[in-house]
Amino acid sequence: MKAAILQCDRVLEHLQPRFGDYPGMIEAMFEDAGHRNIEFDVWDCEQGQYPPDPAVYDFFITTGSKADAWGDDPWVHQLLRFVRQLDEDRRHLIGICFGHQIIARALGGCVERSDKGWGIGIAHNRVLDCPPWMQPCPPQLDLIVSHQDQVTRLPGEDERVLAGSDFCPFFMLQWNDRFLSVQGHPEWQPAYAQALLEERRGVIEEDRIEQALQELQHSTPDNGLFVQWMMAFIGS
């Protein structure tokens, strides 16, 4: 199996010796879940890099990004065009965090800076819908999060809301039979999320950071379960 990672950001340079960069986290996510037969290529979307022949890939997957999915950066608009092309070509795409929001915007939904503030720590989401590929299907999905923006309106066509919460109603979405996305970070480990929170002291309220650090220490994210769902979705 061959996959393309659409890289939309980089880990802070001084954290890379400990944690690597985002494409490496995505590769490790699949390997940790037992999927070691995937060949990955990385395309730097911020630099306008895209595969000349998308047909060679079995699926595409985005990294997150500190950029605004609702913004007007030229590279964001180029990514939106590429996502629409993948949709027209009926290619599989998995959107993570920023990629979740990019899919929403590309397909006609709305993404905005949320008035609910930062989502950090581990988000606990109710599983609302269970397509046949989404097995096992527990009542809750817990994933690490780090976001201010949210999908606030759906296009209202083929999408299914698979998981959500009062804080983030559209947390996990199946857009059609090829696009799947989630607001969380199944590729992140708690240690990286903790290090990133320490970087954001003074940016995020101190009590929210302390609460998020406690969640990361005492909860286990469902990374492996989400990978299992992804692979089943791609193969369905």
Image (spheres, rainbow, N blue to C red):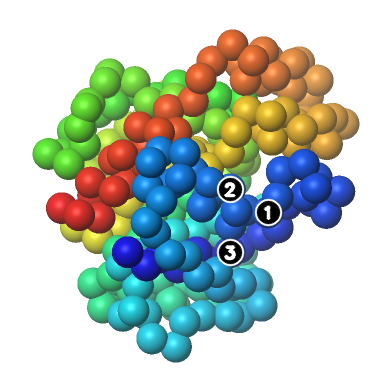
Q: Is residue 87 above or below residue 61?
A: below
Dot in front, 1 or 3:
1
Q: Residue at x 66, y 78 (%)?
A: 47
Q: Disc 3 marks which residue?
A: 7
State the SS at label 2: helix
- Residue 48, can we see it? yes
- Residue 101, can we see it? no
Could you tell me how far apart the alpha carbons at marks 1 and 2 are, in whole angstroms? 7 Å
State the SS at label 1: loop
> Are the two marked residues, 1 and 2, in contact with CB atoms closer than 8 angstroms?
yes
Q: Disc 2 marks which residue?
A: 25
Q: Disc 1 marks which residue?
A: 21
Q: Residue at x 63, y 28 (%)?
A: 190
Q: Residue at x 12, y 39 (%)?
A: 132
Could you say where residue 174 lies in the image, as x and y percent from the top left? Answer: 27, 48
In the depicted view, which residue is nearer to us: 165 or 141?
A: 141
